[in-house]
Image (cartoon, coloured by chain):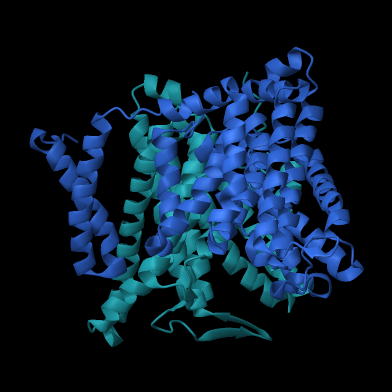
Chain colours: A cyan, B blue
Amino acid sequence: MFFQQLINGLTLGSVYAIIALGYTMVYGILELINFAHGEIYMLGAYLGIILLGFFTASGLTGQSLILSVALTVILSILFCAMYGFTMEKIAYKPLRNAPRLSPLISAIGISIFLQNYVMLTQGATDKVFPYQLGDTAIHFADVQMTITQVLIIVISALMMLLLHLFISRTRIGKAMRATSQDMTMAALVGINVDNIISITFVLGAMLAAVAGVMVAVYYGLVNYSIGYIAGIKAFTAAVLGGIGSIRGAMLGGILLGLMESMGAAYVSTEYKDAVAFVILIILLLIKPSGIFGRDLPEKV
Amino acid sequence: MKIPSSLTGPLPSILIAALWGSVMFLPFKGPGPALILFVALTAGITGLYGVSRLKISFRVLEGIPEFLSQHRIPATATLVLLFTVFPFILNNYYLDVLVMAGIYSILAIGLNVIVGFTGLLNLGFAAFYACGAYTYALLNTKLGLSFWVCLPLSAGFTSLIGLLLAVPALRLRGDYLAIVTLGFGEIMRLILNNWDSLTHGPNGITGIEPPEIANISFSNIKYYYYLVFIILVLSLAIIKRVEISRFGRAWKAIKENEIAASTIGINTTTYKLFAFAFGTFWGGTAGILFAAKMQFVSPESFTFIESVLILSMVILGGLGNTYGAVLGAFLLVLLPEALREVQLYRMLLLGIGLVLLMRFRPQGLMGVK
């Protein structure tokens, strides 16, 4: 029971972690809660189902199934990158110097729009994944782990590693770090801050797309409303780790996933979703800077 | 990357934007609708481009509060007269809509105290609405207390809950406070949904009694309309009084600059607590009016979207403007009723509307910059 929950929690936690990365990167640079980030994840899940359905229907099954899965993942990432890019340009960029309330409300607007956009085009009922993938399970004693779970954990770890390398080793990564430390100073030394912000949004959206496709495979069904709750949970994960900190988001995601599946198993399944909210509220009241975060003094 | 100069004019930019939008739409509905969207987007963006070159004036709307305060007596008399005769000229359907608009107005002016006057973003106001509604529902169905006894109890209890949330939450600033209130709203809904023995979970509570005076039941919508109308006018009068009092001025000082406010001797924490308690009081009042009107409550009426809707009313009217909040509430309740055909697209349009409002008119219809 305990080890089974550990594995479930780890799977869930890896997904939260890669969504949380999107929140934390944007917050690190703009100090903005990108409220619509969860919806990008939802779009990723839908794109996964739609595109895989399209490819398998056009005959890419059997031996070529791997090819259609690969195409699905790549196209989902591309489309979500477009969504992330457009969202920033429409809803946030014009408001960069507005009072802090404005971008948050604009983000809520985008979030409501995207939810209803998907509801109207894809229907309000659950959409089922066309293919059952990776049902075979590995057993240790009474604990079982499906291939999908292994894949989710491995792919998430890989994404985090890639992101870490990108941010610590590349020129763009360096520019991102500089921008998040001091935007004005970064602009003064010749960094195109607008481009860096766009890249940050696109990176976050690409990660969310991967998370979405993986969750669609894992649960086998998606709904237009999954983005809101997943978004809140991923945001909690980001705050738990210390918002603005990349490794914090990774750790926070895993911790939250574990706490939630333990909570569901040992406390109450009905209040499973409340776990994240309670943690979030307690955390913000006691230690809003999270595990790895810095305490920022209030600017006068 | 250099952009060729042939692509930077207005027409190529419009076409590229339209193409971009329809490509993003493509996987969701297929090539046919995407093509239609392309044409629609081209036309729409061209139209917006044209409109953006015109100067739209909101002078008239901005003048309303000023006009009202200069000609207070005739203006109030006209409005009161108009709303008094409505039950004689409108049918029950319209009265029903107006009652909802009145209830939402009370919610909006309550939230406006917290967000508009004091500048504390609250994304969970529906929780206080629910609190007022459920307090009456439970006191009435379990203990048989009447509407009139419950009116102060519900509103007072909601105010207390608001205060209890505010004590710890107010140490947070800005976005974090918004997220905590959002979390509180969700927890409230989850509790109402899962505490079956008390709240009957998702099925809700039925059989709530409408108010009664001397055996005359207010279940008749005409009477109920007057009740809501009178409470709305009372709450408006009280809130306008408080707004120009020491409290209102302290709230506005905190909103402008909290540090500056504390240096001139305003105890910011105390006044923020007052704002929460006072604002949520009206949330509770609206809640009991809603429960007594529907004679039924369920958690479904108090979702996050409901909180966003109330906030949208305040923002649309103009943050910090009490009459604006009422205008916003009436617009957002009446518009979807007037545009029945687009009922399905109601929330979609609300989303777009919020983004556009923040972009082009962040101070709302009746707000001043």
Q: Position of residue B333 (x, y in %)?
A: 52, 52
- In front here: B353 or B110? B110
Residue in the picture at 16% in, 47% down: B15
**To which quarter of the image does residue A72 belong?**
bottom left
**To which quarter of the image does residue A3 belong?**
bottom right
Q: Is there any visible trace of residue A162 in the rendered image?
A: no
Residue in the picture at 77% in, 38% down: B278
Is the residue B320 above or below the residue B193 in the image? above
Is the residue B73 above or below the residue B323 in the image? above
Numbered label tally = 0
Is the residue B248 above or below the residue B347 in the image? above
Q: Is residue A197 left or right of residue A29?
A: left
- In front here: A114 or A240? A114
- In front here: B120 or B205? B205
**To which quarter of the image does residue B193 belong?**
bottom right
Q: Position of residue A177 (x, y in %)?
A: 46, 34
Residue in the picture at 73% in, 39% down: B234
